[in-house]
Structure formats: C-alpha cells, structure tokens
Image (cartoon, helix red, strand yellow):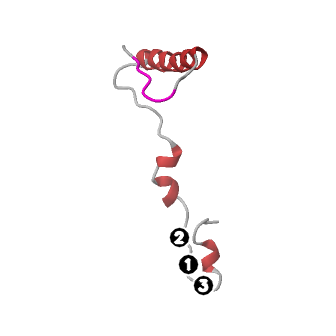
Amino acid sequence: MTIKVVRGNPTPEELAAALAVVRARAAAAATEPPGAQTPKDAWSDPARIAAHRVPQPGQASWTRTYWPS
C-alpha cells in the first residue's frame, strides 16, 4: 500500500498519527467476518424522521413544524 500526501506539508508526527489511524481501521475491518452487517448511523435512518406524529394544523402549528414534540 502506498500513501501519498497530495496537499500540505505534514510533520513526521502528524503523518505517523494519520498512518496509525489508517492501520487501526484496516485491522478492525480485517477482523470482521465477511458479510457482517454494520450498525446503521442514526442520522441516516429515515425512520428517525417518520417516528414522530405529524403536527396538525392549528393556531400555533408553525411552532411545531421543525421540532415535533
């Protein structure tokens, strides 16, 4: 594997830290069994948005349009 610095001039310590992170992630990915499902990120889960009741029209409905209670 070859890593090339495209932009900037990292110090040897910064480069060593970045390589340590890349190696740790590669080692963690190598230990997972093939076909294992990774947990979904809550921010990308569409059920997070649809889990709340849609506000009904009314006198103060504009206050509930973005943050459902």
Query: How far is mark 3 from mark 1, CA to CA?
Result: 6 Å
Q: Is residue 18 above or below residue 48?
A: above
Q: Does the magenta stretch include residue 68?
A: no
* Outermost residue, bottom side: 59
Q: Name the residue under label 2.
A: 54
Q: Name the residue under label 3.
A: 58
Give x and y (percent) for residue 23: 48, 15
Residue kind at label 3, given as amino acid type = Gly
Q: Which quadrant of the figure has residue 61?
A: bottom right
- Residue at image point 56% right, 82% down: 57
Q: Which mark is residue 1?
A: none
Q: Quadrant of the N terminus?
A: top left
- Residue at image point 51% right, 17% down: 19
Q: Name the residue under label 1.
A: 56
Residues in magenta, as a range: 3-8
Mark 3 nearby-residue class (10 Å; few <14, some 14–19, many ≥20):
few
Q: Which quadrant of the figure has residue 26?
A: top left
**Secondary structure beneath label 1:** loop
